[in-house]
Image: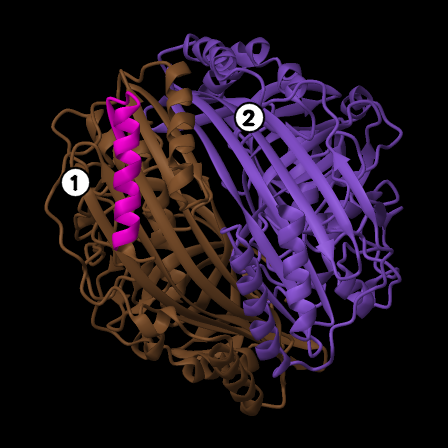
Chain colours: A brown, B purple
Amino acid sequence: MDTKDLVDLSRKTVKVAVKKGADQAQATSFLFDRALTRFANSQIHQNVASRTGGITVKVVTRKKIGTLSVNTLNEEKIADAVEGALKIARVTPSNKDFKSLPRPQKWTPVKGAFDPRTAVCTPSFRAAKVKDIIQTAHSRSKRVKAVAGSYSTGSSSFAVVNSLGVSASARVSLAAVGVTVISEVSGSQGFGSAEQYSRVVKEIDHIQAAEEAAEKSVKSVKPEKLLPGEYEVVLSPRAVDTFVSFLSYMGFSATTYQDGQSFVKYHLGEQVFDDKLCVKDDPRDPWTLFAVPVDGEGVPKKSVKLIDKGVVSERSICYDSFTAGKEKGKKSTGHSPPPIVPFFGPARPFPINLIVSPGHASIEEMIEDTKQGVFVTRFHYTNPVDPTKAILTGLTRDGTFLIKKGKLSKPVMNLRYTDSMLSALKSIPMIGKDLQRTGDTTAPAMKLQKLRFTGVTEY
Amino acid sequence: MSHELGNIALETATKNGASFADVRIGEVFDEHVTVKKGLPDDISLRQTGGLGVRVIVDGAWGFAGSVFLTKKEASQTTKTAISIAKASSTLKKKPVKLTSQKARKDKYITPMKKDPFKIPLDEKIEVLLAAERLIAKQSDLIKSSSAFFRAFRENKLFMSTEEAELTQQITWCGGGLEAVAVRNGEVQRRSYPASFRGNFSTRGYEFFESLALLDHAKQVGQEALQLLDADRCPSAETDLILTGDQLALQIHESCGHPTELDRALGMEADYAGTSFLVPDKLRRLKYGSESVNIVADATVPGGLGTFGYDDEGTQATCVDLIKRGLFVGYQTSRETAAELGLKQSSGGMRAMSPIALPLIRMTNINLLTGNWKADEIMEDTKKGVLMMVNKSWSIDDKRLNFQFGTEIAWEIKNGSKEKILKNPTYTGATPVFWGSCDAVSKDDSKMWGTPNCGKGVPGQSMYVGHGCSTARFRKTRIGVLR
């Protein structure tokens, strides 16, 4: 089954819905083939593959909307799915905010989004890579006690058709490796991790990931306690990703904006961040991972400047057709979540192709420029404390080091930060020149003038 | 059809060299009804299903799942699992060993009075709209008001080469309310009965009715408004009283996750992390005070983590995790239990769908009741803060350092509840915090359901429960944001 088959299935579904009385109808079908080899304690312990397919039918009758999702791509079950959606719509009150499903717009596929080799990797291929990773990490030092992580490959396809003429589809491949290395000296553990993502499995340098994680892990043993307080910080791209992803989650969705729960609403046109900070959402940037040309409604995804030289504005907000219909003069920016993105929360428009503009510095230069500060490899379990003030809390993990007089000095115990991003990202003296894919975000390293640490762990 | 597919999978596994295999075949129905600002927001039904085959070949695991329920796919999926297991075996340190298990043929159905899927949709919508309208009516400052209903049903068949044959129908439902008040860029939220869409229980529609959303809507709206004018929670070290709705998440994060044996054995090191409760500390570490008794109980009526059998066929049971403050037990699978030398699994293996691999998941992690009445705890507190309903949460990857925020708090002075405090937060280290617990109530214990616990790679979401009542924690650090 390929994307053409998915388009055909969606088209047939829409046809059935209209025939059964829907004023408007939309059908989104999808097919995922994904495999993942997971390892821990330097051996494979979970090794899985799954084939998932399904279709979501949305019908509208007199502004009454019904949605039904079924995990089947069986044509014979289409009529039942449509009937189920219509049944929901019949008893649902009219939604006066609903204007219309989107009308067709021209779109073109994203070149290089799909790599056939990445889609068909075998279990033995992944096992061989995992073996390399484990051997590489252990060969780095006798202190390395355990290697954990995962190596995944696969592909996702989806097609959207609606009764107004929208007909769009996309297919992407994805490969990822994550490595966590645990070292031990005299009962003291050190942790290090690294990860890589690509649309093309060939681009994944699993040896480099293993070496990076092992080096950080070995250097992290016997961490010392650093008192909480405000410190200069040098953030790796993965740590930057956490801040930027949460900002986008909290701030740039039209739903949170319209509900008054986005910090953007209260700072329109203001220079809220350092003028060096530029973040865009762009599905066609070569760096983006989920390179899909259309969103979950088949609307071409537009490039949106979320933060432009530190400024947020009305133009920063990401819309789908429903939220755009609630504001005069707004059009969908193509941010209805496509089914390829794993997201457990409520469906709402949000950016999935975040790119932070690079600067000119190397990480070494950022460290040299720091008198007393903290180097952060990544953050763990970050959550919003106050979304409208963009306050986050979370912990450092897998390699936290004290920077003293321009040099990485010693490992420190993981720290908890609690700070507003409006304050932490207000002064960014240096931004890294190299970009790294960190999932749905691509980011450089960054040096922040200050980040507020409010607690410390015991390891 | 299901049994036929199950037999095909097991026969294919055996023929292709599997020393053990189990297969799960099932379907999931997930109904969401949300109204927001007087309008339907999400009225949808999600149906998923499929089969998942787990095999051991050459002493290593392989797993494959598919949503396509045909004979050909059952056979092909099993062969995929076999090839995956063979690849796993190239990197094994020792062969997988499972605790022995009595083969059972049994059926389990969640007991209920009213099937939530048989209640007309328009009836549910009407109830939600009435409650939501009452919230919105409280003030123009209420910028967002929502009411939620969700019903979930899982029909599943488990079969194994050990001749197990178990069919289950697990049903749960529930809902809640949310009010968001906004003034001059300040946002305050109140929810009922708990945040993140309410409370859920393995009961029928009668549980949703018992929530009586309409009766609580006015208070939810009023308290969101009151928070706009409230004083901020001070920064201090003081006595902290938590009601069950917040304590449930505290138990979840600081006891539920660290007592998962796969975490403690390093199997989740790459994602959620490990655990400070390593096997060396079993029956040695003082986790909390004498008042702290925590169990993992998959049998408690109405618990969101209540079922007949877990997803590797182990019968639901209750195990001690913390007894009189001492760390005494883990949540386990057949494999991890054997690793630790235990005779039986605690029955904690569950998967979010048939096509996902079962992992050790919480069942109902319950803090057993103490000797106090909830009112007595309040009256006995000279100076402190009462916090209620979770707003934010974060904990480190060994589950030691945590920080929580709640929607609302009250200052306590000389045993009485005084003024409302906004933006309350508290922080601490797990054994210190539970060590400071000196009072647990006996009269307001309740089951709280968390339908969205995340774990694993690829990520899975699971429904779990927590039974708890009001409790007091001495000298806790509050007010991190000041």
Chain identity of mark 2: B
Q: Position of residue A101 (x, y in %)?
A: 22, 30
On screen, residue A459 versus residue A289, left or right, reads right
Q: Position of residue B113 (x, y in %)?
A: 72, 18
Question: Would you place residue A91 above or below residue A414 in this image?
Answer: above
Residue at which label 2 appears? B421
Q: Residue at x 44, y 75 (%)?
A: A404
Q: Position of residue A59 (x, y in %)?
A: 31, 27
- Whether residue B148 appears in this view of the structure is yes
Q: Residues within 10 Å of mark 2 (few under 14, many from 20)?
A: many
Residues drawn in magenta: A4-25
Quick one: A306 or B105, which is closer to the camera? B105
Q: Residue at x 54, y 35 (%)?
A: B29
Chain identity of mark 1: A
- SS for callout 1: helix
Residue type, label 1: Arg
Residue type, label 2: Leu
Q: Residues within 10 Å of mark 1 (few under 14, many from 20)?
A: some
Q: Position of residue A280 (x, y in %)?
A: 21, 53
Residue at which label 1 appears? A315
Task: Please say whether residue A209 is one of the residues in the magenta stretch.
Answer: no
On screen, residue A116 versus residue A408, left or right, reads left
Magenta stretch: dominant secondary structure: helix
